[in-house]
Image: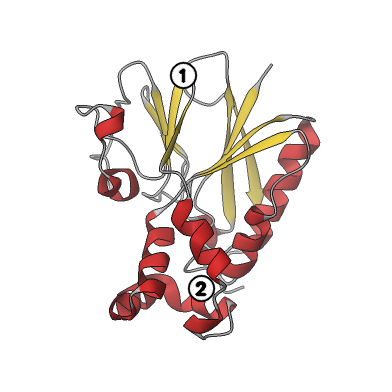
Amino acid sequence: MSLTYVIPDIHGRHDLLNDGLAEITARSETGVIVTLGDYVDKGPESKQVVDRLMSGVAQGWSLVALKGNHDALMVEALRDPSKLAAWIAKGGDAALASYGGDPAAVPEVHIAWLDRLRLMHVDAHRIYVHAGVDPEIALDQQSEATLLWKRYPKGFPGGFGDLHVVHGHDNFPEGPLLYQGRTNLDTLAWRTGRLTIGVFDDDRPGGPVDFIVIRGSPAGR
């Protein structure tokens, strides 16, 4: 069985990311790991999260790292000082602290890596994206704003035609949220300490066949 493991919004929780990657790679010698973006901001160790993902995963594994809206905000703020205050107000203060508090101390290789991240990943049965897709617009015509910022109407069950949409962004601490056409994996892990990783069968359409739940300390404890 070929599996894809999907890690949602990390937001500076290096501990949860490390534990999640260890649990995934302990289950098999090969597979695909998709991370849904929002690696930075809010949690305490944005720098360490970026370092960890830039270093790649175990041999035999493929890592597909997607961009989240907070990753885009960080890049914009560090390249345009007029946007720095807006980023800091959205959790960028925590990210900046992980680099020592000085915007100039953020390595250009980190900024460039975040900037180059893909916006979506598509396989035979699913679309993986940070926030969502517009079901009425062709995939190659989707705007970056939609892919990074979209919020589905509450309870909306649809995906994208026959493709199941796997996303994060719109947190639901008691989740994940499972619908016929989409799966929302974001359980506010940076605050709750509970990271929910979706496991998808590459040969079977639809939602997850399993979950890996990583439990760490809630924020501030």
- Give the residue at x 46% y 42%: 175
Number of numbered discs present? 2
- Tell me the amino acid under the disc marked 2: Ala
The scheme the figure's colours follow is: secondary structure
Q: Quadrant of the C terminus?
A: bottom right
Relative depth, front residue between 20 and 214? 20
Relative placement, left or right, of 91 versus 108 is left
- Give the residue at x 26% y 37%: 142
Classed neighbour count for the residue bearing mark 1: other residues with Cα under 10 Å, few (<14), some (14–19), many (≥20): some
Picture coordinates of residue 56, whole percent (x, y)? 69, 48
Which numbered tag is attached to residue 60?
A: none
The residue pinned by badge 2 equals 95
The CA span between labels 2 and 1 is 35 Å
The residue pinned by badge 1 equals 125
- Tell me the amino acid under the disc marked 1: His
Classed neighbour count for the residue bearing mark 2: other residues with Cα under 10 Å, few (<14), some (14–19), many (≥20): many
Is there any visible trace of residue 178 in the rendered image? no
Picture coordinates of residue 190, whole percent (x, y)? 53, 61
Q: Quadrant of the N terminus?
A: top right
Relative placement, left or right, of 130 versus 145 is right
- Relative to 218, is 64 above or below? above
Picture coordinates of residue 99, whole percent (x, y)? 58, 78
Relative placement, left or right, of 214 versus 88 is right
Picture coordinates of residue 27, whole percent (x, y)? 77, 32
- Residue 35, picture quadrant: top right
- Give the residue at x 65% y 62%: 51
